[in-house]
Amino acid sequence: MDSALPAPRSNDAPAPIAEFRASPGVHPPGVPREARIFVNRHLRMSRIGAVGFDLDYTLANYRVRELDELAFRLTREKLVEKRGYPAEILSFALDSAFVRRGLVLDTRRGNLLKMDYHNYVVRASHGTRPISSEERKGIYRTRRLRTSAEAYVSVDTHFHLPEVYLYLLLVDFFEDLRRPTDFHQMYKDVRAMIDEAHADGSIKREIVRDPGRFLEVDPYLPQFLASLRAEGKTVFLLTNSEYYYTDVLLTHLLPAGDTGSWRDYFDLVVVDAKKPGFFTGGGRPEKWIERGPGTPVRSGGEVEGFEREIGFQGDRILYWGDHTYGDILRSKKSVGWRTAMIIPELADELLVTERIRPDLGRLDAAIEDRDRVLREQHLTRTEIGRLNWLLAGSSASAEEARAEVLRKRTRLEDRLAQLETERVRLHDRITSLNQTCNGAYDSRWGPLFREGNEITRFGHQVRDFACIYTSRVTNLLHYPLNTYWRAPMERMPHER
C-alpha cells in the first residue's frame, strides 16, 4: 500500500505482537536524540483506544518567522489605526528569537520574567532591556508570585510570541519618551488588536491565500496517521480553528485519501472546539457540519458527548497538543485523558546539549570539586573551633601541650586559607562555565527547562501534565506502535 495514503480502518483486532518496552534511556537503535520521545508517566499504547490531535503547531507546523512577522505587522498597524498609537511604532522590527515559551509577562511593570519551579523570578527584562540581578531581587525576591493574578500573562503558545515582543518594544518606546504609561492597559491594547487580527480574518486570510509560505510539510505525517488507523486506533482531530481554515491547512499537508479528502485520515473531526472550555463545560453548542458518508465533522460540543461518539473515555484516550493549559493541563486534570506534548524547541535544545556535553561534564566536575572544598572548609573550621576551646581552658603548667595545639591550629588556618583560594577559583570557573553553557542555549534566557540546579516553571508544567513529550508527532514512527512507555523511577532526596 502506498504509505502516502490512509490505511483502511481495521475492523478486527490487530495480530498480537511482542510489546516493546521503552525503559528510561532505552530507545530503538538509530533514533537521533532530537527525535526521541521522553516519558514522565507510564503509558501502555495497547491500552489506548483513541488518539487525538490539536491542529496548530501539532499537526500543522508553521514557518515561525513568516507567521510571527505577519501577526506582528498587522497588530502594529491596528494599534495605530484603532487605538491611536504614534505612527513611529510602524517602524518597529520583530526579533523573533527574543521571547520564548515558558516565560511570564508582568504587565503592571512592563517586565518579562523567567521563573523557576517555585515561581521565583530568576531572570528578567524591563521591555527588552535586561534587569540586573540586584534590581531583580529588589523587585521580586521577597515573595513567590501568584501568576494567576490578572497582571501576569503566561507565554504558553507560539502565538503569544509576536504580541509579547511588540509590547516590550512599546515599553522601551514610552520609557525613552519619559512619558507616564499604564503598562497594564497597554498590554490590553496589544492583546485586543491581535485578537481582532485573528477574529476579523486578517491573519488567516493571508495564510489561506498562500499556505505554502507559512506551513512546513512533514512528509511522514500521512504515513503516521495511516499507521495509527491500521493499528486499530480511533483517530480524531480536535481544534479551536474554524472548518474552512482547517480544510485549507490539511489539504496542503495531507494528500487526498480514497474519497478525495484529508478527512480520510480521521474517524472524527471537531472544529471550533473552544478549548479549554470543551473540557470544563464551557464549549460551544454542538453543530454537525458533515454527518453523511465519510468522516463526520462537527463544530463545538463538549467532552461528554464527544467521548460517547468515539466510544472511549478517560485514560483510554491519548491527546497530542502544544498548548500547556488549553491542550495538556485541562485534558489531563479535567477529564483524565493521557497527554502527549509537542515542544518544537526541544529538538534545538537537545542538539545544543550534545554540542556542549564536554563543557557540561567540566561544569559537573567543578561543582563536585567545589562541594568537596566546602565540606573540608566546614570540617576545618569546626576543628579550629575545638582547638580554640582547648586553648581557652588550658593552664600555664601545660605549656608543651598548649604549644602543640597552637602549631596544629596554625597548620589548619593555613589550610583554610588554601581552601578559600581554591573555592574562589572554582567559583569563578563554575560561573564562567555556567555562562558558556547557558549562553549556548539562549544568550538572554538560558535553557528552556532549567535554571542552574532548578527546573523552570515551564519544565515543571511539562513534567507534571505531559505523560510523554517530544519535538513533533511523527517522532512516534521511530517506535513500535504497541510501545509500553516506562517512566524513570522517582526518588526522594534521601533515596538518591
Image: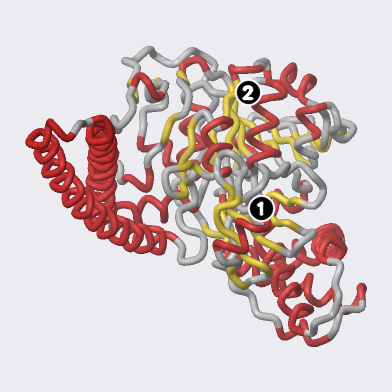
Quarter of the image with the N terminus is top left
Mark number displayed over residue 337: 2
| Label of residue 140 in the image | 1
Mark 1: few, some, or many residues within 10 Å (few <14, many ≥20)?
some
* Place of residue 317 in the rendered image (x, y in percent of width and height, measured from the top left): 60, 22
**In the image, residue 305 lies at what x, y percent?**
79, 20
* Furthest residue in direction left, as rendered: 400
User: CA gap, disc 1 to disc 2?
Assistant: 36 Å
Residue 135 shown left or right of residue 345 in the figure = right
Does residue 318 sit above or below 253 in this rendering? above
At 91% across and 73% down in the image, what residue appears? 83
For the residues carrying marks 1 and 2, which lies nearer the camera in this image? 1
Q: Secondary structure at mark 1?
A: helix
Residue 321 image-quadrant placement: top right
Q: Residues within 10 Å of mark 2 (few under 14, many from 20)?
A: many
- 90 to the left or right of 487: right
Mark linked to residue 185: none
Scheme by which the image is coloured? secondary structure
Q: Looking at the image, is 262 positioned above or below residue 382?
A: below
Nearer to us in this view, 36 or 93: 93
**x 75%, y 65%: residue:** 203
Looking at this view, is 121 or 386 the one in front? 386
Residue under the point 81% across and 77% down: 77
Q: Determine the secondary structure under disc 2.
A: loop
Three-letter residue code for mark 1: Tyr
Q: Looking at numbered disc 2 in the image, what kind of residue is underneath it?
A: Trp
Residue 335: give x, y in percent of width and height: 70, 21
